Amino acid sequence: MAAKYDFKTSPDIQGEKEQPTLYPQIVVSGTKNLKDLAKDIARRSTVHEGTVVGLLCDLESIIANYLADGYNVKLGELGTFSATLTCRKVTDKSEWICQRTTDNGSFSS
């Protein structure tokens, strides 16, 4: 099944365009979860669904560990996972009240 898309209007922040600019956006059909993936993989292979669930849980855990250690994780053509940070803006490093890395790269509170 091919993904469906719709066109959305891009806001004209500067108010200079006579016609709105359009951009395509995927129409989401829903969300598939780990169990859905495991069932589909099991149907296409000789591996049992429970084995696939175990493998995917291990994969999730290992990727999380790699990200926590500061690595990006590339999974073939699926894409690359990378960690990001979100926090409030500060004017001085001493104002940052959360875990931060030390000079050797380990975390401290």
Image: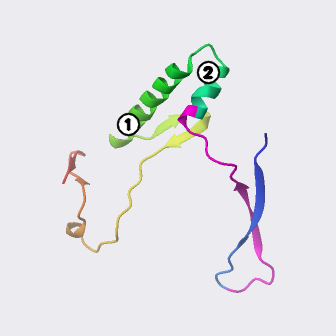
The N terminus - image quarter? top right
Q: Image point 60% across, 33% down: which residue?
A: 36
| Residue occupying the point 56% across, 39% down | 33
Q: Which residue is mark 2?
A: 42
Give amino acid for label 2. Ala
Direction from residue 55 to residue 65 in the image, left or right:
left
- Evaluate whether residue 70 shows in this view: no
Q: Residue at x 41, y 48 (%)?
A: 83
Q: x, y percentage for residue 79?
A: 57, 40
Rendered view: 62 above or below 48 = below
Q: Quadrant of residue 38?
A: top right
Q: Is residue 26 visible?
A: yes
Which span of residues is magenta-colored?
Answer: 15-35
Q: Residue 59 at x, y = what percent?
A: 45, 30
- Relative depth, front residue between 20 and 28: 28
Label 2: element kind: helix
Name the residue nearer the viewer: 40 or 83. Answer: 40
Helix, strand, or loop for circle 1?
helix
Q: Position of residue 35 (x, y in %)?
A: 55, 32
Q: Residue at x 77, y 51 (%)?
A: 4
